[in-house]
Image (cartoon, rainbow, N blue to C red):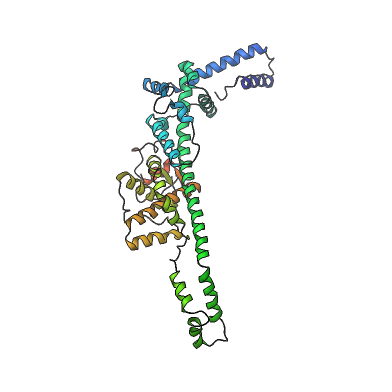
């Protein structure tokens, strides 16, 4: 059950006969024995999975081999075709695959009855064979290939969705950082006159030979003059936030991120440790805001996970009463926090089943944490 390669099985059989000090029979006899063992392994594989091969499931598996006019290819080939770039379109395409697999119950398949090597072999061969080649095989060989490939796709596509989510957000964050650096460079060029004025002011103020009562006259008089002072005041720009404007630059990509982040949050569940509790509550609240179409962030929305360098954005938006700005910055903080949590293993995607099927998520934090083998502190429910 662990291996299916005829060459490997032949070599293993010969090695066993040598170790057991048994006179090896002729190659033809060993080959027949290997072929017989493979046939028994195929029957055993089918028998162990027989409970999964209901008439409805067999019909669904056969449908994977039929060309779907809407995508102009078979669903089997569609599932095995990966994205070429981390774009919003690619993320939504993988989410669509994930929803398709869940509708087939692929996330709930129990393949533990087969050894890991047998599962890997079946999934690999099933993906390598064409739809026509699979159709020509008898049901006892075809269905194990398709079922194992379906179960493997459920895990692979979920991992792909999370990875693309990370890459797409990171790409926009990097773009915002480059834009921020360009703006800082322009700000530095425009501030050369003010920098020169500061140098001249410091030269006067720090000169101990100049009496205090003469400093004001020198600044407003011949040494600097009102014209330079007024020009410097006119060129004054608002103070930069602690992150030098990175989050503000990322806000220009808010509409782009909204093209795929609601779909990801609605289909993937996340869990984490006690340090990530507030972040997970924020993710859950954002998921509910997306589902209900609510724009205003609740007053009790958590902000403890927001880094210090970004809290000024939330404070300023709340002070000015701009619910739109607050929603944008809070949502961006949630998404970036989730991305960083997944990278640092502070957050993990919840288990394949049952957490990955919408509507069947445990209502208590302990259930969420247990599904991902992590512990969550009691408190607000995370669904």
Residue beneath the point at 30% across and 49% down: 294
Residue beneath the point at 35% across and 49% down: 285
Say above or below: 95 vs 250: above
Out of 366 and 243, give the one closest to the viewer.
243
Say above or below: 381 vs 126: below
Say above or below: 267 vs 232: above
Residue beneath the point at 56% across and 14% down: 36
244 horizontally vs 14: left or right:
left
How many numbered discs, if any?
0
Out of 41 and 250, give the one closest to the viewer.
250
Give the x, y percent position of residue 329.
39, 55
Query: Which corner quadrant holds the C terminus?
Result: top left
Query: Which corner quadrant holds the N terminus?
Result: top right
Give the x, y percent position of residue 269.
40, 42
Residue 345: in sight, yes or no?
no
Residue beneath the point at 30% across and 46% down: 293
Quarter residue 370 falls in: top left
Residue 17: in sight, yes or no?
yes
31 horizontally vs 195: left or right:
right
Give the x, y percent position of residue 257.
41, 46
Give the x, y percent position of residue 47.
46, 19
């Amino acid at each position: 059950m662990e291996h299916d390669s005829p060459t490997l099985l032949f070599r293993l059989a010969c090695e066993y006969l040598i170790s057991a000090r048994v006179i090896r029979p002729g190659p033809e006899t060993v080959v027949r024995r290997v072929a017989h063992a493979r046939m028994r392994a195929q029957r055993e594989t089918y028998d162990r999975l027989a409970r999964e091969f209901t008439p409805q499931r067999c019909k669904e598996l056969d449908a994977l081999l039929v060309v779907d006019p809407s995508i102009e290819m078979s669903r089997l080939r569609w599932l095995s075709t990966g994205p070429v770039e981390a774009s919003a379109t690619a993320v939504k395409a993988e989410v669509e695959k994930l929803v398709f697999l869940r509708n087939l119950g692929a996330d709930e398949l129990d393949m533990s009855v087969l050894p890991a090597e047998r599962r890997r072999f079946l999934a690999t061969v099933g993906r390598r064979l064409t739809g026509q080649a699979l159709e020509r095989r008898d049901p006892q060989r075809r269905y194990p290939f398709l079922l194992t490939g379906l179960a493997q796709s459920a895990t692979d596509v979920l991992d792909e969705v999370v990875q693309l989510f990370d890459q797409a957000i990171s790409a926009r964050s990097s773009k915002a950082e480059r834009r921020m650096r360009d703006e800082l460079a322009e700000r530095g060029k425009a501030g050369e006159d003010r920098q020169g004025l500061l140098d001249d002011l410091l030269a006067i103020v720090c000169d101990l030979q100049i009496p205090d009562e003469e400093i004001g006259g020198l600044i407003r008089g011949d040494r600097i003059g009102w014209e330079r002072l007024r020009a410097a005041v006119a060129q004054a720009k608002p103070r930069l936030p602690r992150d030098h404007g990175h989050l503000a630059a990322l806000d220009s990509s808010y509409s782009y991120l909204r093209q795929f982040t609601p779909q990801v949050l609605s289909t993937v569940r996340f869990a984490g440790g006690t340090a990530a509790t507030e972040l997970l509550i924020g993710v859950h609240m954002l998921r509910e805001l997306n589902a209900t179409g609510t724009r205003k962030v609740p007053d009790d929305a958590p902000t403890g996970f927001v880094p210090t360098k970004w809290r000024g954005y939330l404070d300023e938006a709340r002070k000015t009463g701009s619910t739109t700005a607050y929603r944008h910055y809070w949502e961006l903080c949630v998404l970036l926090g989730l991305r960083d949590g997944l990278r640092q293993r502070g957050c993990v995607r919840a288990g394949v089943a049952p957490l990955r099927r919408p509507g069947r998520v445990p209502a208590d934090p302990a259930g969420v944490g247990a599904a991902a083998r992590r512990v969550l502190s009691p408190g607000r429910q995370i669904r």
